[in-house]
Image: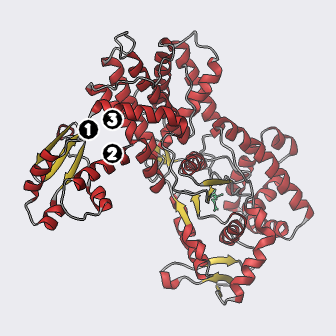
Amino acid sequence: MKMELIKAYAEEIALNIDGNLDLNELKQLIEKPKYEEQGDLAFPCFLLAKILKKSPNEIAKDLSKKITNPLFGKVVAEGPYLNCFLNRKIVGKEMIKSILKAGENYGSLEIGNGKNVVIDFSSPNIAKPFSMGHLRSTVIGNSLSNIVEKCGYIPIRINHLGDWGTQFGKLIVAYKRWGNEKSVKQNTIKELLNLYVKFHEEAEHNPSLENDARLWFKKLEDGDEEAYKLWKWFRDESLKEFSKIYELLDVFFDSYQGEAFYNDKMKETIDTLNGIGLLSHSEGAEVVDLKEFDLPPCLIKKSDGATLYATRDLTAAIYRQKQYQFEKALYIVGHEQSLHFKQVFLVLEKMGYDWAKGLVHVPFGFILKDGKKMSTRKGKVVLLEEVIKEAIDLAQKNIEIKNPNLENKKGIAKIVGVGAIIFHDLKNERQNNVEFSLKEMLTFEGATGPYVQYTHARACSILRKGNDKANTSNLMGLDDPHSWTVIKSLMEFPNVVEKSFKQLEPSQIAKYLINLSQDFNKYYSHVKILIPDGQQQCRLALVKSVTLVLKEGLRLLGLKAPDKM
Ligand code: ARG
């Protein structure tokens, strides 16, 4: 709609100017006036001034008299700018009609043409707790998957499980020394974490443990039966626990092919690297030199033959390109791994893979508690499942106070509690650190998920009271300032979707939803929606449009929007 208006404005200008003008060029020039009082669209006349050899002010003045299309209610010259005020009734009516017609498809774009985008996200490490960093990756990756889909791509959601690596050597050593089957079965992640922490404590005064761990990992890589059985058990039990979190967050994956999946595929990668002469020896290991880029070498194989994280990522990228012919592959991983991804992408380019240009590391900041990073190593960890359950409990308490007669309180509390956590993360630009505060996440006021969900539920309740009479058959349009603010906000949605895709930034959508909610709540408090004055249908149609956009926006972030709360 906004695009159409801009196009129409450019056409109108071209129509009233003698000479051959490039419509696209004119369109590009149209902007938003600096202040709202100055109108809805502004056209700077400098380019025309050059072409027509007249002053821009004169041109603006001239055009302001010539444009008579009723779509542009008022056209005024403001110095060198030609500003127009859109006809609110016409635009509002068309806007609402097109939203109601499109329904949940409003804002969908056709940028992707059905091409595949691989999104590598969440990817927790087996036998370790699901960390706050993995939570961020999960919610950002899930939202980006929805956003790329909204833009016409097919998202391929991959959980690149950290199910291989030297930590399994440590774990096996620790388990054999201090562990027992029963407690691992009862409380897998907690117990495995205890073992992992104990390993590090003991290793501080018993360095031989590190060596044992290396040996056990080597055994594992060589297919030793005992090592493999333990590994497989740790993996299965851990996945069971992760699944609970994914279920709570309502996140799914197309593939759980983690690091171990590439064990039998790495030889080919190493052979290829060797074949084209990219491998060199450095301190006993085989590496790809990256001096030309001022980067440390990318480690491919250790002196004992063990492969590395980077080897697995190289192999995974090659495999995924074969499997999915992706146009882009996004890696949603904290910025502490920036160097790793730079190295991996460069090695793939050096290998001559054209598609490596489509690989993107999408980094994000830490979650902090009292200003400090939350880490797993020393057991200084908040177990995520507990955090989510606490959020749900708190949401339920809120509901008991606010709306004790609500049906399905448990179900709604889950939607609100989980939504609060997700929204709190996504409202921040992803590169920023996020301070963790359950209390702040769960208030119904301010920039929170519950606030947006509540606004949606409130709008739904108005529709119920109006018997959902929102139909578009004889809309007359609305022109009061509060409706107009809401309509303008609704008009922005497709642009916001596009921006969030281009910047890979769900926060664009989260911020937008806050603004739309605020605009709507202002509208709600100033305008009597349900009085039967002949305009009621129109207002209900506007309210309905708001519910559609709020719900769809929340969906893109990974939140549900209950009709009542
Ligand atoms: N498991 C890794 C970690 O927790 C993240 C994996 C990210 N994905 C990848 N393809 N490297 O640090």
* Mark 2 Cα shell of 10 Å, populated few (<14), some (14-19), many (≥20): some
Contact between marks 1 and 2 (CB within 8 A): the answer is yes
* Mark 1 Cα shell of 10 Å, populated few (<14), some (14-19), many (≥20): many
Q: In which quarter of the image is residue 55?
A: bottom left
What residue do we see at 81% from left, 51% from top? Answer: 234
- Give amino acid for label 1: Leu
Where in the figure is residue 524, as x and y percent of width and height? 36, 20
Q: In this view, does 468 lie above or below 483?
A: above
Between marks 1 and 2, how big is the CA–CA gap?
9 Å
Q: Residue 86 carries which label?
A: 1
**Disc 2: which residue:** 5
- Give amino acid for label 3: Val
Q: What element carries label 2?
A: helix
Kindly tell me whether residue 421 is visible in this rendering: no
**Disc 3: which residue:** 91
- Position of the C terminus, as image quadrant, is top right
Where in the figure is residue 354, as x and y percent of width and height? 59, 76
Q: What element carries label 3?
A: helix
Quadrant of the picture in which ligand 1 is shown = bottom right
Contact between marks 2 and 3 (CB within 8 A): the answer is yes
Q: Which of 327 and 433 is in front in this view?
A: 327
Q: Nearer the viewer, residue 43 or 351?
A: 43
Q: Nearer the viewer, residue 101 or 400?
A: 101
